[in-house]
Amino acid sequence: MTKPNMNYASLKDSYLFFRIAQKVKKYSAEHPDEKILRLGIGDVSLPLCESVIKSLNDAVSEQAEKSTFHGYMPECGAPFLRTTIAEYYRKRGVRVDDDEVFVSSGASDELGDILDLFDKENSALIIEPAYPAYVDANVIAGRKIILLSSSMNNGFTPDPDENHAADIIYICSPNNPTGAVFTKEKLKKWVDFANAHQSVILFDAAYEAFIESENVPHSIFEIDGAKTCAIEICSLSKTAGFTGTRLGYTVIPKTLERNGMRFNDMWIRNRTTKTNGVSYIIQKGGAAVFTDEGQKEIKENIAYYKENAKILMKVLDEFDIEYTGGKNAPYIWLKCPNGLNSWEFFDLLLKEIQVVGTPGEGFGSSGEGYFRFSTFGSREDANAAAF
């Protein structure tokens, strides 16, 4: 008899967004004239920028001609895009070779797939509150998970702890859900810790384009020693509106080795075995993001979301509510006022001002008592919620 992966039975029910949807549905049915202001969704609301659309359309036209048609693409990414992304790093002073860049169908896919590189006996350290997929992917793999709680006291950026040593270390900066960022000094501590313990950091840099503070690294490879202990996973979803188009990239240094195995070589073997590459059309659209005009256009979109954040932060400041995020990240993570728990605050906002956010409990036990607002919605909803 076929034996299924019984680790699936250990997964917690993914009830968070279902429960939110049910509550909103019930409220809307009882109050059909009320407009719901949605500040919980993590999806973007602005369309792809003009440069990307033009490149996508040009690529579609190329597919209509025999002389310019493209079938299967290289599994690790088209050379033109790998070079473009590597140059993006080099312009920021980070030396990355073209063949250290791997094109993916998005950070979420890659965060799950990348675990193929690690033995199932490896332990995984996850700083909570955390993106739930970090935990779930390792539960599915049957790994031991070590949870490191963070709080407002350490700005949700804890230092490494000898009592929480692990083989795989997850760091997300700017962070989802807390909006917190690791400074160069903080990140250096984790890099040194990983090298000392021969651990590997999976650095989720999906929101790097939102960083505006000088002392906050856009890439972990800005830190000395990172190329011997880190893999960086990036996305164009939130930075360039590719949530429905699906494109990301991963950087694996050729200097990252464990037990005589080079992770870059392993990932080449994995991709050539398990994928047929990302579509030519999508990769051409992605390349446009890194042009001068594309960068100008996506920064205008990011500025729009940041203005939403300023509107919401102004209200939180007026009411003296503690929060992190908003400045270097598209999320605002606030402490629920008056001792309310996450779901009590959710119900209060929905019933009193028709605002929907995300209860912090859904991001792990350390998230209880906190609440997440997303700034990816419309200006109209941000203004209405604030005023």
Image (cartoon, helix red, strand yellow):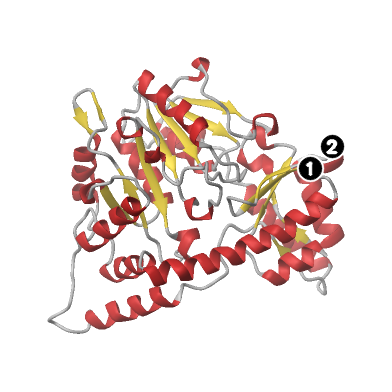
Residue 339, labelled with which disc? 2
Q: Residue at (29%, 35%) from the top-left corner?
A: 117
Describe residue 173's horizontal placement relative to residue 84 as left or right.
Answer: right
> For the residue marked with disc 2, what is the amino acid?
Gly
SS at circle 1: loop
**Residue 153 on image: x %, y %:** 69, 29
Q: Is residue 54 above or below residue 280?
A: below
**Residue 120 on image: x %, y %:** 34, 28
Describe residue 125's horizontal placement relative to residue 332 as left or right.
Answer: left
Q: Is residue 243 visible?
A: no
Q: Is residue 244 above or below residue 17?
A: below
**Residue 302 on image: x %, y %:** 55, 63
Q: Residues within 10 Å of mark 2 (few under 14, many from 20)?
A: few
Residue 336, labelled with which disc? 1
Q: Residues within 10 Å of mark 1 (few under 14, many from 20)?
A: many
Q: Is residue 242 visible?
A: yes
Q: Quadrant of residue 375?
A: bottom right
Q: Residue at (54%, 43%) from the top-left corner?
A: 131
Camera-nearest residue between 87 and 113? 87
Describe residue 140's horizontal placement relative to residue 323 as left or right.
Answer: left
SS at circle 2: helix
